[in-house]
Amino acid sequence: MAQESGKEKSPEHEEDESVELISFLVSECYVYMIPPPRKTVASYRAGEWYVNKWTREGVLKVISKGEECIIRLEDIDKASGALYARAFLRSGEPHPVEPVIDSSRW
């Protein structure tokens, strides 16, 4: 266990202090209201969305912290950087992000 100023830290506390590394950054991204999930196997089509009617604008970050990988969507206002949404990429769990089938740009 690590010590700081005569105080012992638990291994859990040490893990919480892992350095966050930004692996990927999109300085301008948009959140859309997408249609309800399809009843077929087909995925979403970006062409069905109203491209000029986003619900939120933000900054997207993919962050590595210790053994974790986190996708964060933060407010575009860099001064506040308030968290809007986050998703964890974890081994053995469903992927929190789905691609669209009609464009590689989306």
Image (cartoon, rainbow, N blue to C red):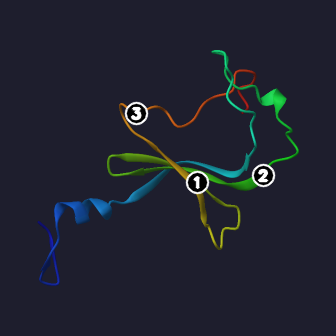
Residue farthest top in this picture: 41
Amino acid type of disc 3? Glu
The residue wearing badge 1 is 85
Q: Residues within 10 Å of mark 2 (few under 14, many from 20)?
A: few
Amino acid type of disc 2? Thr
* Secondary structure under the numbered disc 3 in the rendered image: loop
The residue wearing badge 3 is 93
Residue 53 image position (x, y, % from top left):
86, 46
Instruction: Name which of mark 2 and mark 1 comes first in the sequence.
Output: 2
Residue 95 image position (x, y, % from top left):
49, 33
Q: Is residue 67 left or right of residue 63?
A: left
In this rendering, the count of numbered labels is 3
Instruction: Name which of mark 1 and mark 3 comes first in the sequence.
Output: 1
How far is mark 2 from mark 1, CA to CA? 13 Å
Contact, mark 2 vs mark 3 (Cβ under 8 Å): no
Q: Residues within 10 Å of mark 1 (few under 14, many from 20)?
A: few
Q: Is residue 33 left or right of residue 7?
A: right
Q: Nearer the viewer, residue 96 or 27?
A: 96
Q: Residue at x 83, y 29 (%)?
A: 48
Residue 39 image position (x, y, % from top left):
67, 19
Q: Quadrant of residue 6?
A: bottom left
The residue wearing badge 2 is 55
Residue farthest bottom in this picture: 5
Contact, mark 1 vs mark 3 (Cβ under 8 Å): no
Q: Residue at x 83, y 28 (%)?
A: 47
Amino acid type of disc 1? Ala
* Secondary structure under the numbered disc 1 in the rendered image: strand
Q: Residue at x 37, y 60 (%)?
A: 19
Q: Residue at x 63, y 15 (%)?
A: 41
Q: Quadrant of residue 42?
A: top right
